[in-house]
């Protein structure tokens, strides 16, 4: 009975979403404020019913209700309770429900926070979010109902995929989806602006904090996924250019471009139609990711069980939502005229270059991801595109992007005195060059061109990002306005980019990997560490059995730590899982994973020395923290300027 | 004006490809070997490096040629089903142990069961290149006259076996007594 209530709640939510998607939008067009007033109550009601469905599904998992097909497929009575909860989004149907839950939450947040916006505009934004919600709700109800029954009920469940039974993966989907789905908000702001036909500087100011917040979730989500892949897949890699990883990375690149282009539109009133297009593109790419993951058009290790009817439905959804927005764009974008120009050397130019380079990077990733599909569809054969393509092609726009990033941050709006800029940055450039040459040579006693380039660029970005904040702290009495929180945010996020670049460069240049056959007592020397294999023993987990190896790590004869990598076999699904053991430190990780038994007490053991690898995720977290600072800047929180508001409201009414 | 139409045009092209892609199976890779004689090879046997196994073992009767390795998760997945085929179907399975480590391969067979009449040990993957191996696991069906009849990429499942292999095996043995 309870699961049927969940399904019923979803149907009610769909009903409210239909109203939310139509009445306020029509009301805004014909100028009826009693119709636009439907927007907020419908959004709130929808949230209540989607949340009810979500809680009911969670309850079905916690109470081991194996008469629900989805629960029987993805849970087991022996599964620890925390993972039962995580199993709610461990498969296709439940993860769609999570998607809906997060969309309903974002919509509710927009409904509350949009009270300071002109009524007609807010109604349109909420209406557009309603359209997205209608699409996803009907997709869930028609093709992927999580509350379908299994009769007769299973005695016990099929268990959650062991790969997903991990603390990192419990949080990864909700955070990543918050980012994906959050991009629906700037999308809705953009489409609402196109619908109303007017777009002023306020539009960018309203959109920016939402975009930055969604971007921040996306950043953390991707970083979590990468961290998980590093310690759970047992290869010690942190990014595989898998189609599904790319599917999350493309919206991130587009959102990054959007944040920068919004800055120009907010400050200078130019790039308007371009910014709108980016807002549409960012969310479209996140829908595209949904399509790629769930339709089976590409081969990926992450792909959900796919079903052609689902593929057709999502493609239809993508066509209606993105295609519709782009048609609207084609019809209306001409009206978004820019309000001014800028000089060749100015912050605008640098941000334009930033956008072009980020777009080139997005296109390169998109092309590489879809290339096998293109060739196959044209009957030109079957190929797979691997990391070598991505590594090479991605670097081409990234190197100039990093170089220009350091300069662009210090350029002023409208026009910049290039001599003064050069003066200011020459010291930073010298520091970066020295770091690039000296760090590899002194610490690691070797350096290649790419290593020097990578370290120098990383240092360049960090030094340039921290230049203003640090000089502000050092010379407290210096004249001038204090830095705003948004400026702190920008510096912090860019410093995060620098940390990330350092991490990637040093790890890939100086990481050491070795696969060894080891018997009890065997030792291996690596990077000054001594690894001694002390044999294995059997361990019983809650729902798995494992062989646990013991590896003592010594440095200069002193015992540093004992690492215990495991090879697990989960009782229900019986597939083997590798649990790597890692001794993490900021400047290096020691990574030990157990391979296969080789007979006679010997094991293949994978030992890796990973310098600076923590900087990769640390960099991402620092970027996200910068995002928090920027999104909470005073100008987004302060009571809105009443006069501008009244003016915009008037404009919106007139044009409607 | 046209530049504002560019995004929707690009999107339409992409959507066209996606619609086409939905009707394709990305896992299906055709083999140029089908209908041609099985590539010749001569390799040491997995169980005894002194012994050798060559392509002459194929082509006497309808047989399977399965590419496997211990590092391949899909191989572990299909292994139980291979054991079942070996036990009940009467079709002999020859293995190509691909880019593997002899000790781990032997312990794998000892723990999971050995469905193979014999496995050839292709340590550097030279024979796999001649066979156009794309990834493990792959299963070739070789006919009585030594031609390659069919190739399946990805773990072998009962459905694939029923749908793709059984009809071809029956057609191949024709009037002769089937296994």
Image (cartoon, rainbow, N blue to C red):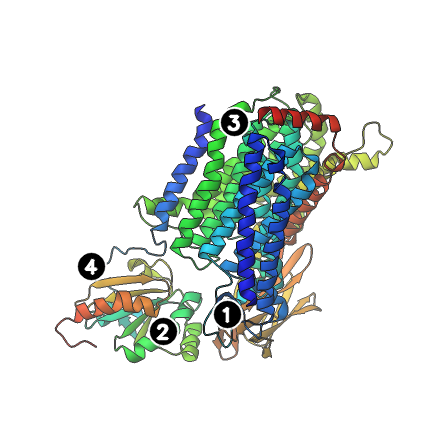
**Same chain, labels 3 and 2:** no
Gap between marks 4 and 1 measured at Cα: 46 Å
Mark 3 packing: few (<14 Cα in 10 Å), some, or many (20+)?
A: many
The residue mark sitting in front, 2 or 1, is 1
Q: Is A274 drawn above or below residue A136 in the view shown?
A: above
In the rendered image, which residue does mark 1 sit on? A72
Cα separation, mark 3 vs mark 2, equals 59 Å
Horizontal side of A551 relative to B167 (left or right) equals right
Q: Secondary structure at mark 3?
A: helix
The residue indicated by pointer 2 is: B81
Q: Nearer the viewer, mark 4 or mark 1?
A: 1
Residue that protrudes farthest toward the left in the picture: B175
Residue at x 20% of width, y 73% of height? B61
Give the label on residue A530, or none: none
Asked whether residue B116 appears in the rendered view, the answer is: no
Residues at discs 4 and 1 both on one chain? no
Can you tell which quarter of the image residue A464 is in?
top right
In which quadrant of the rendered view does residue A496 lie? Answer: top right
Q: CA distance from mark 2 to mark 4?
A: 27 Å
Callout 4: SS: loop
The first of marks 2 and 4 along the sequence is: 4
Q: Which mark is residue A333?
A: 3
Residue closest to the eye, A58 or A80: A58
Spatial distance from mark 4 to mark 3, Cα to Cα? 59 Å
């Amino acid at each position: 009975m309870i699961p049927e209530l969940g399904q019923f709640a979803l149907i009610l939510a769909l009903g409210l979403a239909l109203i939310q998607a139509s009445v306020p939008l029509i009301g805004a067009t014909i100028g009826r404020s009693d119709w636009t007033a439907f927007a907020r109550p419908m959004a709130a009601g929808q949230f209540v019913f989607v949340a009810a469905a979500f809680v009911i599904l969670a309850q079905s998992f916690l109470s081991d209700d194996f008469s629900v097909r989805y629960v029987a497929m993805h849970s087991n009575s022996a599964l620890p309770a925390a993972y039962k909860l995580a199993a709610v989004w461990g498969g296709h149907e439940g993860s769609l429900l999570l998607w809906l839950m997060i969309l309903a939450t974002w919509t509710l947040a927009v409904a509350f926070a949009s009270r300071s916006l002109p009524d007609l505009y807010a109604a349109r934004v909420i209406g557009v979010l309603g359209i997205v919600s209608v699409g996803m709700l009907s997709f869930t109800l028609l093709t992927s109902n999580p509350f379908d029954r299994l009769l007769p009920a299973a005695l016990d469940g099929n268990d959650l995929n062991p790969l997903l039974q991990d603390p990192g993966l419990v949080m990864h989907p909700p955070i990543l989806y918050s980012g994906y789905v959050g991009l629906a908000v700037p999308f809705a702001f953009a489409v609402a602006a196109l619908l109303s036909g007017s777009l002023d500087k306020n539009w960018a100011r309203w959109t920016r904090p939402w975009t930055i917040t969604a971007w921040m979730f996306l950043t953390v989500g991707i970083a979590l996924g990468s961290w998980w892949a590093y310690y759970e897949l047992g290869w010690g890699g942190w990014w595989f250019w898998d189609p599904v990883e790319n599917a999350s990375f493309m919206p991130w690149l587009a959102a990054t471009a959007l944040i920068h282009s919004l800055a120009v539109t907010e400050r200078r009133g130019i790039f308007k139609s371009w910014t709108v297009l980016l807002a549409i593109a960012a969310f479209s790419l996140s829908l595209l990711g949904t399509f790629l993951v769930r339709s089976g058009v590409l081969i990926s290790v992450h792909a959900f069980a796919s079903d052609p009817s689902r593929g057709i439905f999502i493609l239809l959804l993508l066509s209606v939502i993105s295609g519709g927005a782009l048609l609207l764009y084609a019809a209306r974008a001409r009206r978004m005229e820019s309000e001014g120009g800028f000089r060749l050397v100015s912050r605008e130019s640098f941000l334009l270059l930033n956008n072009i380079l980020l777009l080139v990077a997005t296109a390169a990733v998109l092309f590489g991801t879809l290339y096998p599909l293109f060739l196959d569809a044209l009957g030109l054969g079957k190929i797979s595109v691997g990391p070598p393509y991505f590594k090479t092609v991605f670097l081409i726009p990234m190197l100039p992007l990093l170089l220009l990033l350091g300069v662009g941050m210090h350029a002023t709006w409208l026009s910049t005195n290039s001599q003064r800029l050069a003066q200011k940055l020459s010291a930073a450039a010298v520091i970066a060059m020295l770091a690039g040459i000296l760090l590899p040579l002194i610490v690691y006693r070797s350096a290649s061109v790419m290593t020097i380039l990578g370290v120098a660029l990383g240092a360049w970005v960090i030094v340039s990002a921290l230049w203003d904040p640090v000089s502000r702290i050092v010379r407290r009495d210096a004249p001038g306005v204090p830095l705003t929180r948004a400026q702190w945010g920008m510096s912090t996020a860019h410093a995060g980019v620098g940390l990330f670049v350092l991490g990637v460069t040093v790890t890939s240049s100086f990481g050491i990997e070795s696969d060894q056959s080891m018997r009890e007592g065997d030792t291996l020397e690596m990077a000054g560490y001594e690894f001694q294999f002390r044999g294995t023993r059997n361990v019983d987990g809650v729902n798995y059995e494992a062989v646990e190896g013991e590896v003592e790590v010594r440095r200069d004869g002193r015992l540093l730590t004992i690492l215990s990598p495991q090879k697990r076999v989960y009782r229900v699904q019986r597939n083997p899982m590798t649990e790597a053991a890692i001794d993490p430190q900021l400047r290096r990780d020691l990574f030990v994973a157990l391979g296969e038994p080789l007979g006679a007490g010997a094991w293949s053991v994978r030992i890796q020395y990973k310098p600076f690898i923590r900087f990769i995720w640390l960099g991402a977290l620092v970027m996200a923290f910068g995002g928090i600072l920027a999104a909470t800047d005073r100008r987004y929180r302060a009571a809105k300027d009443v006069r501008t508001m009244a003016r915009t409201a008037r404009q919106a009414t007139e044009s409607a | 004006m046209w530049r504002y139409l560019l995004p929707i045009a690009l999107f339409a092209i992409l959507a066209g490809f996606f619609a086409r892609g939905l009707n394709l199976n990305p896992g299906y890779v055709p083999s140029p070997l089908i209908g041609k004689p099985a590539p010749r090879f001569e390799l040491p046997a997995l169980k005894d490096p002194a012994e050798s196994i060559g392509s002459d073992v194929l082509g006497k009767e309808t047989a399977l040629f399965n590419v496997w390795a211990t590092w391949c998760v899909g191989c572990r997945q299909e292994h139980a089903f291979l054991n079942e085929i070996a036990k009940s179907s009467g079709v002999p399975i020859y293995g190509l142990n691909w880019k593997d480590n002899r000790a781990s391969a032997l312990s794998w067979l000892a723990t999971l069961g050995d469905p193979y009449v014999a496995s050839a040990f292709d340590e550097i993957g030279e024979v796999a290149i001649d066979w156009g191996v794309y990834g493990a696991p792959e299963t070739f069906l070789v006919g009585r006259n030594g031609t390659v009849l069919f190739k399946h990429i990805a773990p072998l499942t009962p459905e694939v076996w029923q749908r793709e292999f059984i009809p071809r095996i029956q057609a191949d043995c024709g009037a002769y007594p089937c296994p």
